[in-house]
Image (spheres, rainbow, N blue to C red):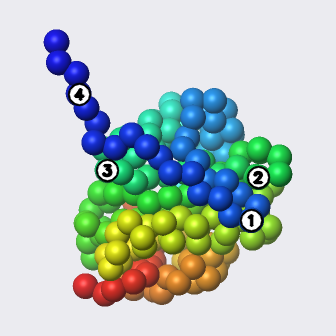
Amino acid sequence: MTSIALPHTTIPVLETERLILRGNRLEDFDALAALWSDPGVVRFISGKPFSPEECWSRLLRYVGHWALLGYGFWAIEEKATGRYVGETGLADFRRGLTPSLDGTPEVGWVLASWAHGKGYATEAVKAAVTWGADKFGTTPLCCIISPEHRNSIKVATKCGFREHARTTYKGGETIIFRRGAEP
């Protein structure tokens, strides 16, 4: 019997003034499921709450990104309390969009409702983007946001993203933002 060596196994821990970005853990599942089942949180993402099964797949996808690609999503926790805030990171979601995002790391973030309006998203995304810029060098980063999600557009802009294109994703209008070198 042979074993399979995964190319990447270490997930860096990032710290900001108020937050810790760390790898996802099994014990994060309940908080992650609560986050993704909150209609207010998913309003501009999927429009409907995620099932426990979908949340489980999401958690596994996060761990798999790090193992296979050497980058992925972090769990965000409040430094002072250890409370689960949400998640942010970089991914290759292979969305099949036009224009294509293939080869462009996609930055994403989502925070629990209680954490909205505290500046946590900007703080966490800036840390993730700084790490991503160090890892990927001159490769641009991107993110996709519903045009109705004004708060996420503000976060993206504060983190150096600019509107690049508009497209349709899963039947809804979506803005593609880019940060860094243009192709």
User: Mark 1 or mark 4, which has the lower sequence index?
Assistant: 4
The label number, if any, that marks residue 79 in the structure image: 2
Amino acid carrying label 1: it is Glu
Amino acid carrying label 3: it is Leu
- The residue lying at 34 percent from left, 43 percent from top is 8
How far apart marks 3 and 1 lie (CA) works out to: 28 Å
Task: Name the spot of residue 179 as percent of width and height, x first.
Answer: 43, 81
User: Mark 3 or mark 1, which has the lower sequence index?
Assistant: 1
Q: Residues within 10 Å of mark 4 (few under 14, many from 20)?
A: few
Mark 1 in CB contact with mark 2 (< 8 angstroms): yes
Residue on which disc 3 sits: 69
User: Mark 4 or mark 3, which has the lower sequence index?
Assistant: 4
Q: Residues within 10 Å of mark 1 (few under 14, many from 20)?
A: few
Task: Name the spot of residue 113 as percent of width and height, x first.
Answer: 75, 55
Task: Name the spot of residue 159 as percent of width and height, x first.
Answer: 57, 79
Q: Say which of 52 and 120 sits in front.
A: 120
Residue on which disc 1 sits: 17
- The residue lying at 77 percent from left, 45 percent from top is 83
User: Mark 2 or mark 4, which has the lower sequence index?
Assistant: 4
- The residue lying at 76 percent from left, 52 percent from top is 78
How far apart marks 4 and 3 lie (CA) works out to: 15 Å
User: Mark 1 or mark 2, which has the lower sequence index?
Assistant: 1
How far apart marks 1 and 2 lie (CA) works out to: 8 Å
Q: SS class of the residue under badge 2?
A: loop
Give the left or right position of residue 125, taking residue 71 as reference. Answer: right
Amino acid carrying label 4: it is Ile
Q: Is residue 124 above or below residue 25?
A: below
Amino acid carrying label 2: it is Lys
Residue on which disc 4 sits: 4
